[in-house]
Image (tube, rainbow, N blue to C red):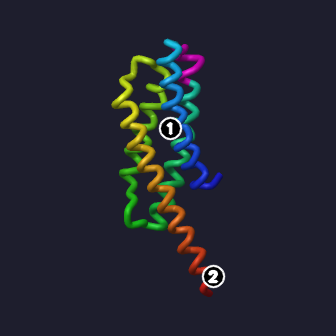
Amino acid sequence: MKLNDQTKLVLKESQNCLTRHQEMRDTDSTPDFFSQVKPHADYWHTFLIEWREQAYLWLDDKRPKHMRIQQIDAAIEAFNQYVVQSFYKETGKKRFAQSIQSTCYTLQNFLNVQEQEGEELDQETNNR
């Protein structure tokens, strides 16, 4: 799977976390940790390890001006926290939403940088 597609999946799951959290609050639900929360969190943790590795390689190769490895690390750390928090109605809504918004901003910037690099590559190829 392409890095661009993986980044879009992480963005989509971030939005799903907002929806899940609201559903948990609306239905006053408490999930079973071992049958619901842990498998979901484990899946995304494994997915992010692979995504991070590809993102690092891409950043090292392209060296974009406005994107750094530290931003990717911060986004992954926040994601790992709120993917679990999204299952619990007790999670404070404001801080939770701000964490997701911050991560989505970073991920969207990363997508934009990838697309800009791809366009520049296409232009170079067409000019030859």
Number of the label disc, if any, that sits on residue 126: 2
The x, y position of residue 66, in whole percent, is 38, 62
Between 96 and 22, the one lying in front of the other is 22
Quick check: 24 above or below 50? above
Quick check: 78 above or below 26? below
Q: Is the residue marked by circle 1 packed among few (<14), some (14-19), or many (20+) residues within 10 Å?
A: many
The residue positioned 53% from the left and 14% from the top of the image is: 27
Q: Is the residue marked by circle 2 packed among few (<14), some (14-19), or many (20+) residues within 10 Å?
A: few
Query: Which secondary structure, mark 2?
Result: helix
Residue 91 as seen in the image, left or right of residue 118: left
Q: Which residue is mark 1?
A: 14
Q: Which amino acid type corresponds to the residue marked 2 in the rendered image?
A: Asn
Between 111 and 34, the one lying in front of the other is 111
Q: Which residues are magenta?
A: 30-38
Between 103 and 2, the one lying in front of the other is 103
Query: Which secondary structure, mark 1?
Result: helix
Q: How many marks?
A: 2
The x, y position of residue 25, in whole percent, is 47, 18
In the image, is residue 42 part of the stretch drawn in magenta? no
The x, y position of residue 74, in whole percent, is 37, 44
